[in-house]
Amino acid sequence: MTCKVKGILLRISPTVRDERMLTILTDRLGCIAVFQKSGRKVQYDQFYYGEWVLYQTGGGNYLLNGFAPEELFHPLREQMENTFLASYFAQMVLYFGRDEENDCSELLPLLLNGLYLLGKGKDPLLVKSVFELKTMQLMGYCPTLATCGHELTYFSLEDGSLCCDACAAPNKSVRVSATTLAALAHILNKAPSKAYGFSIPKDDLLGLSLLAERFSEYHLELRASALQMWKDIYHE
Ligand SMILES: [Zn+2]
């Protein structure tokens, strides 16, 4: 059976046989493994986006029949730090994608917009914060934004509730400004493709970035090598 899906290539791995395994985030099948004979001359790179023509075998495996490119994200590759950040996004999607119960299809527009904006020169801290928080929300880790009823100065890493100095759990909370909180609400309320549409002062953005990263680290057992590589070379 042949089918066509829109998707972005996240990972290329060799297999024991004469094949490559491509992991593709698709619009309606989530994250899937697709096998490509390595004898084929055509090679695809990470982050190639377009229409993939697949053949599904009786055993349920997908074999690659063809690819029509739509966006290859060349501008993204011109800067090493953007490449690392994009790889971190891919690692995050792959982390959720290995569990078939997670429907990762909704992450596709989020990732495509994030990569596009990085290539366009949008502030990487903003793109990264939105990608992390929206991915967490879509994959079932939505901050509750429940409040303690006092002046809100802390974000709880446990459940994403908001509280005051007195109610905040030590080491499990991140200090936040009112502007950071407004940005957080924007991200959670907007559709994946619109979540990046805001700007805030640098100090508030640094706060948002810290919150987003610590919230994902707190809940996921993701050892993202690309995140560390990005941090090693990123300069504000
Ligand atoms: Zn309180």
Image (spheres, rainbow, N blue to C red):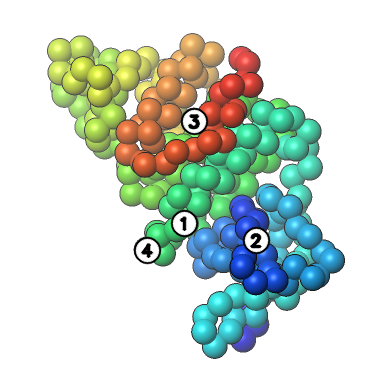
Q: Is residue 170 left or right of residue 36?
A: left
Residue named by callout 1: 97
**Which label's residue is closer to the chain start, 2 or 1?**
2
Q: Who's the residue at 50% across and 49% down the image?
A: 93
Q: Earlier in the sequence, mark 4 or mark 2?
A: 2
Residue at disc 4, secondary structure? loop
- Residues at marks 4 and 3, CA–CA distance in whole angstroms: 25 Å
Q: Is mark 3 within 8 Å of ligand 1?
A: no
Between the residue at mark 4 and the residue at mark 2, the CA separation in whole angstroms equals 25 Å
Q: Nearer the viewer, residue 222 or 128?
A: 222
Quarter of the figure with the N terminus:
bottom right
Q: Amino acid at mark 3?
A: Ser
Q: Position of residue 236 (x, y in %)?
A: 61, 15
Indicate the secondary structure of the residue bearing disc 2.
Answer: strand
12, 200: nearer the viewer: 12
Of labels 4 and 3, earlier in sequence is 4
The residue under label 3 is 129
- Amino acid at dot 1: Gly
Q: Tell me how far mark 3 sits from mark 2, CA to CA.
A: 32 Å
Amino acid type at circle 4 is Glu
Q: What residue is drawn where x is 18% and y is 21%?
A: 169
Asked where in the image residue 56 lies, by quadrant, the reply is bottom right
The residue tagged 4 is 101
Q: Which mark sits nearer the N-terminus, 1 or 3? A: 1
Q: Nearer the viewer, mark 1 or mark 3?
A: 1
Camera-nearest label, 4 or 3: 4
What residue lies at 62% left-to-right and 54% top-to-bottom?
A: 11
197 or 137: nearer the viewer: 137
Give above or below for 24 relative to 154: below
Tell me, for residue 14, which label it has, or none: 2
- Quick one: SS at disc 1? helix
Instruction: State the SS at label 3.
Output: helix
